[in-house]
């Protein structure tokens, strides 16, 4: 299966701390995307990193991609209570137009 | 506001009922998707429409019937559902069907009695 698998399944941190979550996948990809889902809402696209990119930043988010290890990480710096959500990675395989999502990492930021 | 609107937000139905879920996108996208989200499981892709043509049916039981009358509207017709079909059903759209970021609605929470 091409599905990304996030690790850990759940993460609890104090406000102001950094949160790091990882995604592993099995086959070659075109790009990898990270999404956030707040409770009771749909997924929101955060960032896309292409297979020829190694690192990308967007505000307090930093994404890395290591295609040799077939893994990616999402770092949220200086976390806030509003960052409490589930985070999903989605992989876009080569020669495929579909995205495959993992089961997500649930992040809780304590005030 | 994501530009993708789903109605209803909540739906409770018996196994013998017939109902429909509606999705509308205001983003000018050409591809639309139905996903099923169950607790602690990866998002399951159900159907993909690209320029109103169905390009993916991910082995979905026939009790789920999609309809895409135009690029802005997507329906999921439901009949004779089973308790295991209780889940959050998410609609999404993207510019086209080519690995691009998807925009999601807030979903319909479906409960089968």
Image (cartoon, coloured by chain):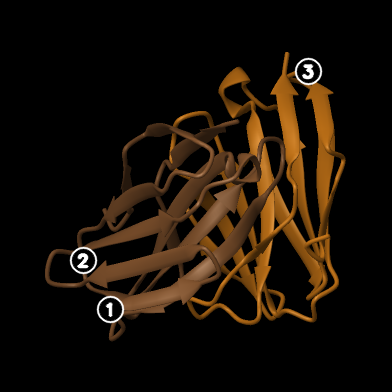
Chain colours: A brown, B orange
Q: Are marks 1 and 3 in contact (CB under 8 Å)?
A: no
Measured from the top left, where is residue A99 in percent x and y? 45, 64
Q: Look at 83% across and 38% down and name the residue there.
A: B9
The earlier-in-sequence mark between 1 and 2 is: 2
Q: Residue furthest left?
A: A68
Question: For the residues marked 1 and 3, what is the alpha-carbon distance in whole angstroms?
Answer: 50 Å
Callouts 1 and 2 on one subunit:
yes
User: Is the C terminus of chain A in the top left, top right, bottom left or bottom right quadrant?
Assistant: top right
Q: Residue furthest top?
A: B113
Residue marked by disc 2:
A27
Q: Secondary structure at mark 2?
A: loop
Does residue A43 lie above or below A91 as drawn? Answer: above
Question: Depth-wise, is mark 1 or mark 3 nearer the camera?
Answer: 1
Q: Residue A67 vs residue B60: left or right? A: left
Q: Residue furthest front?
A: A16
Q: Nearer the viewer, residue A19 or B61?
A: A19
Question: Depth-wise, is mark 2 or mark 3 nearer the camera?
Answer: 2
Does residue B94 lie above or below B48 as drawn? Answer: below
Residue marked by disc 1:
A54
Q: Residues within 10 Å of mark 2 (few under 14, many from 20)?
A: some
Question: For the residues marked 1 and 2, what is the alpha-carbon distance in whole angstroms?
Answer: 17 Å
Question: For the residues marked 2 and 3, what is the alpha-carbon distance in whole angstroms?
Answer: 41 Å
Residue marked by disc 3:
B14
């Amino acid at each position: 299966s091409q599905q990304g698998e996030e690790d850990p399944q759940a993460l609890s941190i104090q406000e102001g701390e950094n949160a790091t979550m990882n995604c592993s996948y099995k086959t070659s990809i075109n790009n990898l995307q990270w999404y956030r889902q707040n409770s009771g809402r749909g997924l929101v696209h955060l960032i896309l990193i292409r297979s020829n990119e190694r690192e990308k930043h967007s505000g307090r988010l930093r994404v890395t991609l290591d295609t040799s290890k077939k893994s990616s990480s999402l770092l949220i710096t200086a976390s806030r209570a509003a960052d409490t959500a589930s985070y999903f990675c989605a992989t876009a395989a080569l020669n495929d137009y579909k995205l495959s999502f993992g089961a997500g990492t649930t992040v809780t930021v304590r005030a | 506001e994501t530009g993708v609107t789903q109605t209803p937000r909540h739906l409770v139905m018996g196994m013998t009922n017939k109902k429909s879920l509606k999705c509308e996108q205001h983003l000018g996208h050409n591809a639309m998707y139905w996903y099923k989200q169950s607790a602690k499981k990866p998002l399951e892709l159900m159907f993909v429409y690209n320029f109103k043509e169905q390009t993916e049916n991910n082995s979905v039981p026939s009790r789920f019937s999609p309809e895409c009358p135009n690029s802005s509207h997507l329906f999921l017709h439901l009949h004779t559902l089973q308790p295991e079909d209780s889940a959050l059903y998410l609609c999404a759209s993207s510019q086209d069907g080519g690995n691009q970021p998807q925009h999601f609605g807030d979903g319909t929470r479906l409960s089968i009695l």
